[in-house]
Image (tube, rainbow, N blue to C red):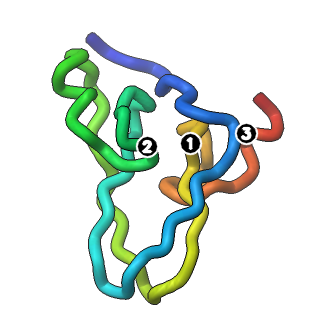
Amino acid sequence: MADKKAVVAGKAPIPVEVEAGKAYFWCTCGLSKNQPFCDGAHLREGTDFLPQKWEAPESRTVYFCACKQTAGAPLCDGTHNRL
């Protein structure tokens, strides 16, 4: 099944304390129960979405996108304010 848009998982960014050099796998489909990260829901639901790998350049709090419509994936760019 060819998906055009991800499911909006939330309309606010999700703050996460990340560790420098650690890889994170952001959910792109919006179906994960472990937002903002992938739990394999895209496979169970038969979508064409794949998780997006993101590596933290430094240890700090970042804001992952939950609406799945950001242009700055995987981080929030405020797009949720226009949904």
Q: Amino acid at mark 1?
A: Ala
Earlier in the chain: of badge 3 and badge 2, it is: 2
Q: Which residue is mark 1?
A: 66
Q: Is residue 31 left or right of residue 5?
A: left
> Are discs 1 and 3 less than 8 Å apart at CB?
yes
Q: Amino acid at mark 2?
A: Gln
Q: Amino acid at mark 3?
A: His
In whole angstroms, how far apart are the C-alphas of marks 1 and 3?
8 Å
Based on the displayed image, in which of its 4 quarters is residue 20 positioned? bottom left
Q: Which residue is mark 2?
A: 35
The quadrant the C terminus occupies is top right
Q: Residue furthest top?
A: 1
> Are discs 3 and 2 less than 8 Å apart at CB?
no
Image coordinates for residue 30, horizontal then vertical, percent: 44, 31
In whole angstroms, how far apart are the C-alphas of marks 1 and 2?
7 Å
Q: Residues within 10 Å of mark 1 (few under 14, many from 20)?
A: many
Image coordinates for residue 17, horizontal then vertical, percent: 49, 73
Q: Is residue 31 left or right of residue 46?
A: right
Earlier in the chain: of badge 1 and badge 3, it is: 1
| Residue positioned 29% across, 78% down in the render | 22
Q: Which residue is mark 3?
A: 80
